[in-house]
Image (spheres, rainbow, N blue to C red):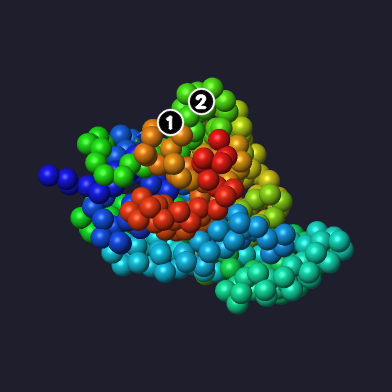
Amino acid sequence: MTTADVTIYGAGVFGLSVGWACIQRGAKVRVIDPAGVASGSSGGLVGALAPHVPELWNDKKEFQFQSLVMSEVFWRDVEEAAGFSTGYARSGRLQPILDEAALDFAKTRAINAVDLWRGQGEWHIVGAADHAPWAPRSPTGFLVWDTLSASIHPRHATTALARAIEKKGGEIVGEGREEGAILHATGWRGLMELSERLGKVVGNGVKGQAALLALDVRGKPQLFGDGIHLVPHEDGTLGVGSTSERFFDDPTEIDQGLDDLLHRAEAAFPFLEGVRVLERWAGVRPRAMTRSPLLGAHPLHEGQFIANGGFKIGFGMAPRVGEVMADLLLEGRDAIPEGFRSEANL
Ligand SMILES: Cc1cc2nc3c(=O)[nH]c(=O)nc-3n(C[C@H](O)[C@H](O)[C@H](O)COP(=O)(O)OP(=O)(O)OC[C@H]3O[C@@H](n4cnc5c(N)ncnc54)[C@H](O)[C@@H]3O)c2cc1C
């Protein structure tokens, strides 16, 4: 007797989101991950769900836009099924406008956002002084405030996804039988293995280190400044990220790189001085060489599928990745943008 319509390798946010989307359509789902739920890149602490700038629109920006727009309902459904908070909050983002040229761009983007974001979010120029002290440094005295950005607690969100899947009858196991449609969502290690077996680099891993701080600024917009993200969480903690390390020996080791990041964060955001660090964390982002997600037919296993390459915005993309992959796995319907298609980009 068949006990699964879909078997998914990898219990990160991609594998779990596809699993959840399939369960919502009535499929029986088995997720296999020997290392356990969110043991890779998805077990993190930052969780910025932020849009691309509203200009030079393309498939990738449109896909991510759709994903951000559907996130609210997606994560609310997960929370309801799981009985556990994902930390999702549509709280916007503030970022500095560094010079006069950037101010001109920002004004154009505010106009573009009306069309491109279709009433789902706004792009405003605001005075930095009006938001102080919760604001990034801005030499022009102005900030961009967008209302499309949201935040989530990655570790809580993946825990909630896993619980939701199990509560709806799905299985999450360390090992198990392959049945039904088979998806590989195995993160950076999957991309390394693929590169090795194809004899060319199709993707790799980019390590990141981040920290969780004891600063309760829940409900405030996330800040981006001096290359650093500050993401307020609904549990009264603050995610601070991240380093970006192409070369590394140990994928989970915490080193001086994180101390340096925290010093830079304190210099850029003086209100962080003296705030207690609750946790330090490192993970490896799966990066396809296209820098876009890699979705569709698996290049090595005929008849099987791949969902990988979330890189720096995997949580932002996950709801729509779940949707298009469920279309493909369960209904054979292919809504994958050309630039993400595994067949076209490997
Ligand atoms: C420091 C840092 C900060 C980040 N900040 C953000 C952010 O603010 N916003 C955002 O959207 N994204 C962010 N990201 C990126 C995001 O975390 C990733 O894009 C996302 O987690 C990728 O999810 P995944 O499911 O593809 O991979 P992973 O989470 O790595 O999951 C892959 C899973 O596959 C399993 N696996 C591997 N091999 C096998 C196998 N053979 N069989 C079965 N299972 C296997 C692994 O154990 C792992 O659990 C950040 C990442 C890092 C590291």
Query: Which quarter of the picture shows residue 165?
Result: bottom left
The residue depicted at 62 percent of the width and 70 percent of the height is 117
Quarter of the image with the N terminus in it: top left
Answer whether residue 40 is visible to the viewer in this image: no
**Label 2 amino acid?**
Leu
Can you give x and y, in whole percent of width and height, for residue 141 in the image? Answer: 80, 67
Residue sitting at the far left: 1
Q: Which residue is mark 2?
A: 198
**Label 1 amino acid?**
Leu
The residue depicted at 69 percent of the width and 64 percent of the height is 54
Q: Residues within 10 Å of mark 1 (few under 14, many from 20)?
A: few
Can you give x and y, in whole percent of width and height, for residue 36 in the image? Answer: 32, 40
The residue depicted at 35 percent of the width and 56 percent of the height is 331
Q: Earlier in the sequence, mark 2 or mark 1?
A: 2
Q: SS for tag 2?
A: helix
The residue depicted at 43 percent of the width and 37 percent of the height is 298
Residue sitting at the far right: 100
Q: Which residue is mark 1?
A: 300
